[in-house]
């Protein structure tokens, strides 16, 4: 019910945008920019580039506002544009691989360094999410971080519903496996143990 | 339910995404299986940590930069509409394609001297015309059938003027023969026109005015007995 109301509100706003109302456009930007940033930043692991992509998404929405089909959900359309742009960016990166001096340490080493500080669990989890394969990561971010319904994730990713469920399940299992040892340490410390479980 | 099957549902269980019946079945299994319970706790930990992941940072000038880009976009749209109507190039090219093709063909025709060929008569044809007249006229005169003129038209013959004159001559010949009683069996046929009508048709009637100079000055009418010469009809 809440979803339907939100959907209708988006339609109303977008109709106003189609009629040239920039206030309505600004409202849509305010409503969705943080959500898009959350998804795209996690996808491409760069805040500046994610911001550029989110900007480009809104510009594309404005450019193609006349071609929007009201049969579809506005947020689905928006996420699809953003994800396509992010995928293009990732593809471009693969083609022209840039080396950062910090990358030379290796991602795993960085995770390990951060994992030595169990109090920073969300950051550790974020790093673990970054290491997931792209197809699992996209489904996982949209479902578990953005909390979109499975049906919408399927539409955004243009894959069957069953495939989405399976990918999300697989991503969760992978994350749990990656974090398992550190989680135990974290739990032990949070229960007042002075030393990590592995040293006991 | 076996452990292996239960474990495939544990992540969904931890998120409460299962149906009520399956949820209850897994709950009952977890109560009796410490290993699966530990796994389920792992999923819960991950879920809890996910909620604590900080939101991505957005720079303070995000909106102003976006507004600037949208303004550029609006300006470009207005400028495009002002100088180039929407979809005009596509439709224009579709409509212009046959026009351009015709224009190119016409240009090629002019450049290769096609117009001159059209305007200036063919010299060979002109020479043939000059040489032909006598023989052709004779031949046509002798071979023409009485009603041939009626079927001739400007489009059917290059020599339509000549043919028309021949046809008229044939008609005149027919009328003269009727006046003279020829082509009848011993007198005027019941279906033949009367004398007044024939004279009218010949342009000799009371109310008839002759508008064209006939080419026939002398006509030799075939008769049953001997040759009768009809001279100076008009």
Image (spheres, helix red, strand yellow):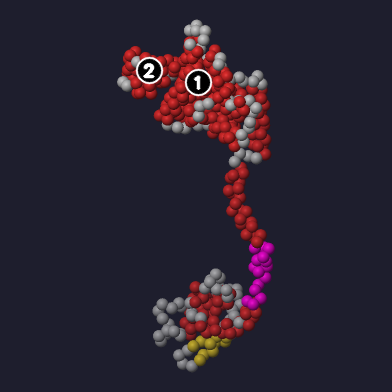
Establish if B85 lies above or below A117. below
Residue furthest to the top = A192
Answer with left or right where residue B104 lies relative to residue B163: right
Give whichever of B81, A92 is nearer the camera: A92
Q: Magenta segment, which residues?
A: B109-125
Give the Cα distance between marks 1 and 2.
Answer: 25 Å
What residue lies at 45% left-to-right and 90% top-to-bottom? B224
Quadrant in the picture for residue B168: bottom right
Counting from the top left corner in percent of width and height, residue B85 is at 63, 39
Counting from the top left corner in percent of width and height, residue B150 is at 50, 73
Circle 1 — which element? Answer: helix
Query: Mark 2 packing: few (<14 Cα in 10 Å), some, or many (20+)?
Result: some
Asked if residue A179 shows in the view, the reply is: yes
Task: Examine the structure image and report whether residue B153 is included in the region drawn in magenta.
Answer: no
Establish if B182 lies above or below A92. below
Give whichever of A32, B189 is nearer the camera: A32
Counting from the top left corner in percent of width and height, residue B158 is at 57, 74
Counting from the top left corner in percent of width and height, residue B6 is at 35, 21
Circle 2 — which element? Answer: helix
Give whichever of A129, B174 is nearer the camera: A129
What residue lies at 65% left-to-right and 27% top-to-bottom? A101
* Mark number displayed over residue A145: 1
Give whichever of B95, A177 is nearer the camera: A177
* Mark number displayed over residue B36: 2
* Mark number displayed over residue B143: none
Asked if residue A76 shows in the view, the reply is: no
Residue furthest to the front = A200
* Chain of the residue on which disc 1 is drawn: A
* Chain of the residue on which disc 2 is drawn: B
Answer with left or right where residue B77 lies relative to residue B207: right
Quadrant in the picture for residue B160: bottom right
Quadrant in the picture for residue B65: top right
């Amino acid at each position: 019910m809440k979803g339907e109301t939100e959907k209708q509100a988006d339609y109303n706003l977008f109709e106003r945008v189609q009629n040239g109302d920039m206030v309505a456009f600004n409202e849509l930007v305010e409503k969705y920019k943080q959500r898009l940033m959350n998804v795209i930043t996690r996808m491409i692991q760069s805040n500046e580039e994610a911001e550029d992509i989110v900007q480009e998404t809104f510009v594309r929405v404005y450019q193609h506002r006349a071609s929007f089909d009201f049969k579809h959900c506005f947020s689905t359309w928006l996420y699809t544009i953003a994800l396509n742009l992010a995928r293009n960016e990732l593809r471009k990166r693969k083609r022209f691989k840039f080396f950062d001096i910090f990358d030379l340490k290796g991602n795993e080493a960085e995770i390990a360094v951060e994992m030595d500080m169990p109090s920073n669990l969300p950051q550790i989890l974020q790093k673990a999410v970054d290491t997931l394969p792209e197809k699992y990561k996209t489904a996982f971010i949209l479902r578990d971080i953005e909390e979109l319904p499975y049906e919408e994730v399927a539409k955004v990713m243009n894959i069957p519903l069953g495939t989405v469920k399976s990918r999300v399940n697989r991503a969760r299992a992978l994350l749990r496996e990656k974090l398992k040892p550190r989680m135990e340490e974290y739990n032990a410390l949070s229960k007042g143990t002075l030393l990590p479980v592995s040293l006991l | 339910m076996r452990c292996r099957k239960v474990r495939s549902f544990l992540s969904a269980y931890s998120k409460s995404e299962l149906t009520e019946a399956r949820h209850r079945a897994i709950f009952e299994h977890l109560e009796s299986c410490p290993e699966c319970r530990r796994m389920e706790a792992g999923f819960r930990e991950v879920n809890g940590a996910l909620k604590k992941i900080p939101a991505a940072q957005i720079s303070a000038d995000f909106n102003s930069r976006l507004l600037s880009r949208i303004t550029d976009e609006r300006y470009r749209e207005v400028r495009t509409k002002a100088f180039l109507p929407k979809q005009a190039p596509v439709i224009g090219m579709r409509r212009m394609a046959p026009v351009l093709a015709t224009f190119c063909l016409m240009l090629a025709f002019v450049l290769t001297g096609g117009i001159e060929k059209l305007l200036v008569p063919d010299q060979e044809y002109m020479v043939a015309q000059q040489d032909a007249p006598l023989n052709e006229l004779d031949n046509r005169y002798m071979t023409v059938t009485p009603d041939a003129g009626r079927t001739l038209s400007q489009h059917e013959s290059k020599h339509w003027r000549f043919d028309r004159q021949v046809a008229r001559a044939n008609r005149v010949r027919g009328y003269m023969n009727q006046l003279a009683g020829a082509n009848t069996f011993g007198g005027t046929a019941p279906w033949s026109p009367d004398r007044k009508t024939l004279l009218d048709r010949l342009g000799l009637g009371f109310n008839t005015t002759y508008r064209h100079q006939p080419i026939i000055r002398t006509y030799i009418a075939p008769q049953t007995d001997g040759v009768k010469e009809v001279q100076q009809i008009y």
